[in-house]
Amino acid sequence: MKFLKFILSIPYAGLAGWLHWLLFKWIIPIAMGTSWTWFFIFFTIVGTIVSACFHSITTLLAFPSCLLCKNNLAAKIVQIPIYGFFGYSSLAFLWSVTPQGLLQWLVALCLTPIILITYIALIAAPFISTDDDD
């Protein structure tokens, strides 16, 4: 059973990482094209709601990962490079948009922690899960 969970955790980590990468790939160009007015509205009012939505999606996608990795250290460890790849790819895409002014630099600096926290939460969720008493 542990081997099956190990095998299933690999494509699931790829799917969860890819879905987050796709979400960030969709939202980054929109955020980088904002004006100063939308920047202040987004990161003061809407930013909190969007951040909560991102982290809710992360929680929903991390739950099956925790179940697959229950009592299986190998399944927990094999997910780290997969999530790391998609996290690095999301951050690389964010900074490859080439911020041209102060506004784009601020947007990139504000989105970087959101992306980092999202992928760190996906990596840490199976290790933090306390239900390892099968």
Image: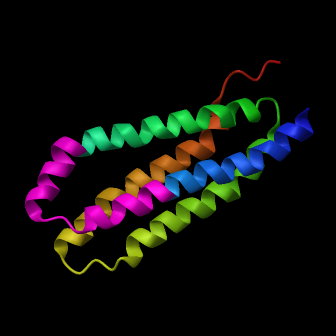
- Residue 80: x and y, percent? 68, 53
Q: Is residue 96 visible?
A: yes
Image quarter (top left, top right, bottom left or bottom right) of the C terminus: top right
Q: Is residue 74 visible?
A: no
Q: Residue at x 39, y 51 (%)?
A: 114
Query: What is the number of callouts on the image?
Result: 0
Q: Residue at x 62, y 63 (%)?
A: 85
Q: Residue at x 76, y 44 (%)?
A: 9
Is 50 on the left-hand or right-hand side of 87? left
Specify the segment rendered in magenta.
Answer: 22-46
Q: Is residue 68 magenta?
A: no
Image quarter (top left, top right, bottom left or bottom right) of the N terminus: top right
- Residue 106: x and y, percent? 23, 65
Query: What type of secondary structure mainly makes up the magenta span?
Result: helix
View extreme (top): residue: 134
Is 17 on the left-hand or right-hand side of 131? left
- Residue 91: x and y, percent? 46, 66
Q: Is residue 38 magenta?
A: yes
Q: Quadrant of residue 14?
A: bottom right
Is 29 on the left-hand or right-hand side of 16? left
Q: Residue at x 19, y 50 (%)?
A: 42
Q: Does residue 130 lie above or below 60 as drawn?
A: above
Is 43 on the left-hand or right-hand side of 56? left
* Residue closer to the observer: 123 or 9: 9
Q: Quadrant of residue 32?
A: bottom left
